[in-house]
Amino acid sequence: MNTDLFFSVSNHTMTVVAVDALYTKPLRTNFLMLGPGPDQGIGRYYMAARAYSSGQGVAFDNTTTTAILEYEGSSTTSPPTMPSLPFYNDTKTVTSFADGLRSLASHDHPVFVPRRVDENLFFTIGLGLINCPGQTCGGPSGSRFAASMNNISFVLPTSFSILQAQQLGKKGVFTTNFPDNPPLQFDYTAQNISNSLSSPVKDTRVKVLKYNTTVQLILQGTNIVAGESHPIHLHGHDFYIVGAGFGNYNSQTDPQKFNLVDPPMRNTVNVPVNGWAAIRFVADNPGAWLMHCHLDVHITWGLAMVFVVNSGPDRLLSLEAPPTDLPLC
């Protein structure tokens, strides 16, 4: 799946009560935004979904998929009605839906947003181009497409998994120098960004976090090659989405608008096209955890990185060693 989806049921209003298996305040809506993830009269109704595509000039599947919701007792010959879906690039509607999601923040479902931040990280995310020495590839000017975080295009290890290499102390599988900030600051969302900024470094780098570290991560979209909305998914942890906006993140003014009262808790955040999102989480799950764009083609291009969370102070808070008979992949 390479796009998010608008989803709707004809003549029905839906109520969102949870996202990513976590409860939210009820949100009444005529459509849902699905990531790659009231009573009505008797009758037959189309359920329909089609792509949301935010990248200008980026090809996508512009078909509409449908299924039929049929109530018992309805005529099987009556034609189902078709719902009205947002236009394929309706970013305003997407933003309104995301802004409407809030945690319950109740006695039974409290919110524990980290107020103290130990690690303040800033990752640029977006597309790029890589040269093809000695051959011509299918991208612009004979190059091929790539994607990166902080200009590092992630390369999956081939000999050992990152977790296995960490546990066994294997050298040469990955390095621990993933940058906390972009190697070069520029106008991330400007038009006509210089081609000199479009070539990422292909490598397998991780960011190491001490156990129970509180993390604030700003995910900044870029307009290199083409600005797009990116659904960024983190394995192993849920996080609070405390803020989001368009343009370049402003570290002086934007934190003043953070929602620290009832932000939605998710494991996937949609970074707006040519915009940013701010998340906070506690690194309390030891292991090696991939963070990546949920658009399939982007992860194959390298839009990913790994957080390695160290073990805690005792055995119950530590990752157990792999068994001696662990089968090889």
Image (cartoon, rainbow, N blue to C red):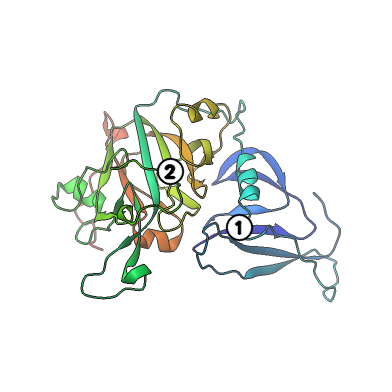
Question: What residue is pinned by disc 1?
Answer: 89
Quarter of the rendering occupied by the C terminus: bottom left
Reply above or below: 221 against 74: above
Residue 153 falls in which quadrant of the image? bottom left
The disc label shown at residue 163, or none? none
Residue 251 falls in which quadrant of the image? top left
Give coordinates of residue 124: x percent, y percent: 38, 45
* Residue drawn at point x = 42 percent, y = 34 percent: 281
The local secondary structure at tag 2 comes to strand
Q: Amino acid at mark 2?
A: Gln
* Residue drawn at point x = 52 percent, y = 47 percent: 272
Give coordinates of residue 34: x percent, y percent: 58, 55
Q: Left or right: 290 with respect to 135?
A: right
Which one is earlier in the sequence, the residue at label 1 or at label 2?
1
Is residue 304 visible in the rendered image? The answer is yes
* Residue drawn at point x = 62 percent, y = 71 percent: 63
Reply above or below: 175 against 140: above
The disc label shown at residue 220, or none? 2
Residue 62 falls in which quadrant of the image? bottom right
* Residue drawn at point x = 37 percent, y = 69 percent: 139
**Could you say which is closer to the camera, residue 131 or residue 156?**
131
Q: Amino acid at mark 1?
A: Asn
